[in-house]
Image (spheres, coloured by chain):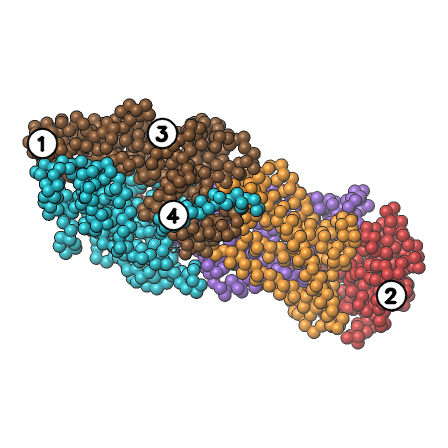
Chain colours: A brown, B cyan, C orange, D purple, E red
Amino acid sequence: MTVTQSNDPIISFDHVVKSYPSATAPGGTFLAVNDVSLDIHEGDIFGIIGYSGAGKSTLVRMINALERPTTGSVTVMGTDLAELSGKQLRALRQKIGMIFQQFNLFSTKTVAENVAYPLQLDHWRKDYQIRRVHDLLEFVGLLDHADKYPSQLSGGQKQRVGIARALATNPKILLADEATSALDPQTTMEVLELLQRVNQKFGVTVVLITHQMSVVQQIANCVAVMSSGSVVETGDVYDVFAAPRDPVTKRFIATAMNGLPDEARVAQMREQWPGRLVTVVVRQHDITDSAGQTVISASGQNISQLIARYGVHSELLYGGIDTVRGIAIGAITYEFTGERAHIDEFLAELAKNSDVVDFGSKDDPVEYATAVSRARIATPLHGRGDENAPARDMRGGDNVRGEMALEQVDDVVDMVEDESTNGGEQR
Amino acid sequence: MTVTQSNDPIISFDHVVKSYPSATAPGGTFLAVNDVSLDIHEGDIFGIIGYSGAGKSTLVRMINALERPTTGSVTVMGTDLAELSGKQLRALRQKIGMIFQQFNLFSTKTVAENVAYPLQLDHWRKDYQIRRVHDLLEFVGLLDHADKYPSQLSGGQKQRVGIARALATNPKILLADEATSALDPQTTMEVLELLQRVNQKFGVTVVLITHQMSVVQQIANCVAVMSSGSVVETGDVYDVFAAPRDPVTKRFIATAMNGLPDEARVAQMREQWPGRLVTVVVRQHDITDSAGQTVISASGQNISQLIARYGVHSELLYGGIDTVRGIAIGAITYEFTGERAHIDEFLAELAKNSDVVDFGSKDDPVEYATAVSRARIATPLHGRGDENAPARDMRGGDNVRGEMALEQVDDVVDMVEDESTNGGEQR
Amino acid sequence: MMVTLASRSDWSVLRPLLFQSVAQTLQMVFITLIIGGVLGLVLGVVLYGTRPGNLFENRVVYRVLDFLVNVIRPIPFIIFLAAMQPVTVSVIGTSIGTAAAIFPMCVMCTFATSRLVEQNLVPVDHGMIEAARAMGASTFTIIRTVLIPEALAPLILAYAFLFVGVLDMSAMAGYIGGGGLGNFAIAYGYQKFDQAVTWTAVVIMIVLVQVVQGVANAIAKRLLRR
Amino acid sequence: MMVTLASRSDWSVLRPLLFQSVAQTLQMVFITLIIGGVLGLVLGVVLYGTRPGNLFENRVVYRVLDFLVNVIRPIPFIIFLAAMQPVTVSVIGTSIGTAAAIFPMCVMCTFATSRLVEQNLVPVDHGMIEAARAMGASTFTIIRTVLIPEALAPLILAYAFLFVGVLDMSAMAGYIGGGGLGNFAIAYGYQKFDQAVTWTAVVIMIVLVQVVQGVANAIAKRLLRR
Amino acid sequence: TKTDEAPKGSENNPVVIGVVGATNPEWVEFTKQAKAQGVYVQIKDFQDYTSENPALSTGSLDMNEFQHLLYLANYNVSNRDNLQPLGGTAIYPLGLYSARNDQGKPIYESLSQIPAGSTVAIPNDETNQARAIGVLRAAGLVTLKGDWTAFTIPQDIDTANSKVKVVPMKAEQIANTLTSDPTVAAGVINNDYVADAGIDPTTAIYHDDADSEESHPYINIFAVRAADIDNETYRKCVEIFQTKPVLDKLQENSQGTAVFADKFSTKQLQQYLQDIERQIRSEE
Ligand SMILES: Nc1ncnc2c1ncn2[C@@H]1O[C@H](COP(=O)(O)OP(=O)(O)OP(=O)(O)O)[C@@H](O)[C@H]1O
Ligand SMILES: Nc1ncnc2c1ncn2[C@@H]1O[C@H](COP(=O)(O)OP(=O)(O)OP(=O)(O)O)[C@@H](O)[C@H]1O
Ligand SMILES: [Mg+2]
Ligand SMILES: [Mg+2]
């Protein structure tokens, strides 16, 4: 699947800022979206990822003017949203479908009525409405629930109603804010297939917020990574996944790849497999930039030949190879046993055409941070040693703090375990 | 991590049925939960997976009697819930924390007040409340948002408030209904770590509904798979993941494993790699049942030696090895090139100690369904050829229908593209 | 109180009057509820919509309407009845009789309704309104297809509440020769100390209210299935 | 209407009476709103809670209370005032005067309030109630800490609405010698055709209502920040 | 009950009198005069006629003064009560007044000018309503199906043979209606409201006679509980009311139309009351 991109972006953010009154500093402001400039082209499936609270929903809600930028401008289908009259804006909105993070179903309308609502707004003929609703509900597997009210549905069923409703009028742009978060993997897969299908068949541009890296991998062609209101990295999905530059991106991608074992895992493996632990990065192709220059070369493609050639004994322990837009990338961890010098020789040969992370053996271990820093691979989640990680400033200091706070929580737990009886007595 | 299990289950479902009036057949009933018997032991992290609408939330909501079974009984901490007085039930509920799928935050209370609420119910001393709320909010990264109202939070932030609130009073049982669905991978990871920590340190029993297989893999020790209101498979996570028996389980696990390529992927690979395509299942250990009998043996552990020994030429194309409770399982797909007879011989040897899926070569392909049916591995998502898949009955006919309906949707899309102008005219 | 049910009044005279009173009351109450109810719905929606932060936020319009409603509502109805007389004459042609009572009742009902409507729209979840906006619905469409349906159950209960209020107002119609059940109870029962007459009329009013509230409850319950 | 502001009445007699009337009205309205408001809140919560499907669902209790409220509310207040007289005497010691007016006002206010409270609790999201239940909160605690706070903004507006209703009721206190602003407007203004007197009293009532509604709006707005 | 110890009429235990229109000059004057004579009274103002008698009966009032004998008789019979008249105050004639034009001038100057088929407004309280119908009958504007009684109602009118239609309404509303409503030709206005409405009582097209035998049922009286018929303090109150300064104020307020009723003794009034009550009972 290659997407033909016209030159003019269908959605364009130009130095967009959205501020709210600060919750902590009275009179101050909090920048939910901070100076974002971004182009989304017609026919894109554009993924947006980032920490919770990074500003993804706020950004996307500006595309259909549910939220207005504090400064900067948003241009959709060639027109600056700020310049549209009420009527023009409504006409534009009818061409934009939206799946809400919180579903926002009409609680007093049945499932069928919810899905029919945008069709009514679009003045469809009644019989077409009925047929369309039927087909959409059949697709999302809710035909039997057509006459239920939202309160009678499970979480995933609600989300599917939201999906059907957003797709009902064949929008030109589809905004999907965590559209599959409440769905099981199979249903997710099928919804993603549908999105891909409408994208390919009708050229619908899809803007996709998601926390599931696999979703981006599977269907997006472009991706933007947000952190603390800013877009810290954006580009072709393959480029970004294969060679993430920003620490935030690296962290995210690490969770998706599962290729590189984390520190704890390496330590654990060393106990069980005392030989030389080596992770080999797998990249099926060279990665080229837009100018056709090779940025990062293929890796790990000749490993089995080399194993065979050198006759080293190997055990497959851990790893993952996954496809990003149809090209396999990943990493595999082996234990090699045999004569030290022979293995060194083998590894040197392997490293010529591959990225290799050498963790050493149980007797002669290489420190995790050192080993990893040598390789061009996304830093895994647990690699907190990463000095490049930006200090989380107050504004974006919004993610789980991990170990330190955890210990404190435990302390409080302990404390409270002792005290709660007292607390109970003093009622 | 090994969990010591007492003999008496802490939660026990005994032939539990929950019915609702049917939405389709007037007067009929719909079984949201259908004759479930299930034991959850103290200290378990018990994962529940299943299609959207399978009855997971309904089942879990019976543990704290938010929902009452239509028939059957639920026993928690040794007492039948049906026999508790109002006061006793309230006392029991204070020992059960719950993270709701829809968060259910108090909209007129600030973040801090939401988290403090269960502490107030538990009559904590004011200064302990403040400290506890502070630490919990620090842990979930919302200290800066303490004075905001839920409507001012992002989706993930809301979910984190729900998590903090559920953990506040150190419950003995924690019910987590898709507790990480709105969270980014890193935050998810950190929340899961916390759950694991409270489980290990304080023996908190965690019941975890999730659609993210990786969540189950990472922290659960037991898992139950629900389909159409019934529990179709349950047991130790490793057993179930390594050797799923029910077709539903197989489908789910396939999505988590990414080990076996789907039919489209195999076809695509065949184009690029004309040699012998073979998927080797990797299992680090034998799988034993509770009696210590080997149910399924290890697999794929000697592949590199064999490759070396036979000197076949191999390319690593696709695959995934992942750890389920610390033991690697997965599958890797190779292209082997060389003399046909030599490769056959090599594969025969490999198959002695490993599960092998032989897709044949481009010139002599093996049909996908045939190839897969020979191996003991979870059927991947796209393997719809699976005849064992149960006909989805009306009651559970609730999942996305896939191809057929999709085509119909497209038809409607086409139809409507033509007709919508007419529709517009006839206003 | 002790109710002496033996009536000293001549029922052969009172009976037709009672029937007439029932008819008058029904006429007054239903016409008022329909006209005042609809106008009050409109005014209430405007009050709600112009509230700061809402659909068509407009501080000036809100302030003015809010003030106006607060000017009209506290006027004791009997004084309002008198004050409206010139207007009533120019609109209805007369200031006495049932029809003349209906006009000021409608005006008062409009203002009272508007407050209740405003109040009941306030809790409607903004997410749904946002969903409709995102689909390109106009403000009017949103009001018609989302806002009002979502608040319908409490609105129905509010109208049932108003029914009693309007019935109460209609009791004052007697002041300007409008008749009605309330007047019947007061003029032929209460003022003549004839308990049987008083309570006959009151019981009919109670039955009316029970029926209306019963219907409202049933509708609200259906709507609350969500 | 043409307001002739030149008053023919003797203001030296009226002025102290006006001050007294303001005091009487404030006394009647606030005592009624406090007592009737609280009792009505309780009754309204019980009505809401016993509704089918709610917190302490009880079909029988609901039916009985619903019926009772519907029996009391339609009784024209002047008739209710008379009917309550024996009870008023046994509770208050007298059946005339301001204190005697407050008692039946409280009773009527309780019933009216209960309906408005019920109506405003109906839209509260069940999810939050469920969350509190799951945490082991007792029904009373849920009412106090979740149900009422969640409905507080519309409840405050409902009480502002009731303020006018009670003010209206207080105008009838004059029937039993209770005085008050409404009586002042009617007896010394309206019944004596003295516009200046009428509207002086009415304007004071309007100002009272503007203040109360203004405060209610401000509180509701704060609460609606959510 | 806390003031029970203090003697009736002292500052701490004033005589409580229920009236309609406490600001009327006669009540202001009466209070002043009584105080001068060492009797403390508290005037309780009521908005209409219905609560004063029950309040007197239950002891919430000591006396009331607002009603005529007919009204009291009707009350006693209806409620099996036994309130008694202590002394008379005045009799007010009931008059028929023409509608007014924009300048406030009467449109009709005489009975004959009132067009056939037009509407006449009358008070809607029972006794005044009956009395007003009596006035209209005497004026020849309506014909009754039977005899007039003190309780005749509009339904007793033979509409086919009457010159005008009647519309009963709140007594105080009638004067308003005469100036603002084009559909009303004339109205019977209780004298209490005539002066207040700025109407000259002498412009009445027709009125009944306040100085005849037939007007005895309409004697306004001070009423007390039967047990208090000999109470000295209450008698003193009546006497004070019947002095010139107070009666002058009363006459001033009625613009000379009232006929004083201070000449009737308590016994006489009680006798009249008894007669009327008997008549009412016999009618049932
Ligand atoms: N009040 C109700 N009336 C009728 N059916 C209901 C009601 N509540 C739930 N159901 C049905 O019961 C089934 C099980 O719902 P449940 O919420 O337990 O699903 P779930 O497994 O949690 O799904 P999800 O993963 O989508 O949250 C669904 O098909 C749902 O439609
Ligand atoms: N009305 C508001 N007032 C104040 N702050 C707000 C408001 N709405 C959103 N925010 C803040 O803006 C930031 C961005 O919110 P947004 O919903 O865009 O995050 P998100 O990236 O979608 O997160 P998630 O993945 O959790 O949904 C958050 O920190 C949030 O708390
Ligand atoms: Mg979001
Ligand atoms: Mg669920």
Q: Amino acid at mark 1?
A: Tyr
Dot 3: what SS?
strand
Q: Determine whether B187 is above or below E83 in the image.
A: above
Q: Give the spatial CA distance, label 2 vs label 1.
A: 131 Å
Instruction: Name the residue tied to disc 1.
Output: A310
Q: Give the spatial CA distance, label 3 vs label 1.
A: 42 Å
**Residue A98, image quadrant:** top left
Left or right: B100 with respect to D49?
left
Q: Determine whether A141 is above or below B138 in the image.
A: below
Mark closer to the observer (4, 1):
4
Instruction: Name the residue tied to disc 2.
Output: E162
Instruction: Name the residue tied to disc 4.
Output: B406
**Chain letter, disc 4 residue:** B
**Chain letter, disc 3 residue:** A
Callouts 3 and 1 close, C-beta under 8 Å = no
Callouts 3 and 2 close, C-beta under 8 Å = no
**Residue D207, image quadrant:** top right
Q: Amino acid at mark 2?
A: Ser
**Residue B360, image quadrant:** top left
Q: Give the spatial CA distance, label 4 vs label 2.
A: 84 Å
Q: How many marks?
A: 4
Callouts 2 and 1 close, C-beta under 8 Å = no
Left or right: C39 with respect to B189?
right
Mark closer to the observer (4, 3):
4
Residue A234 tag number: 3
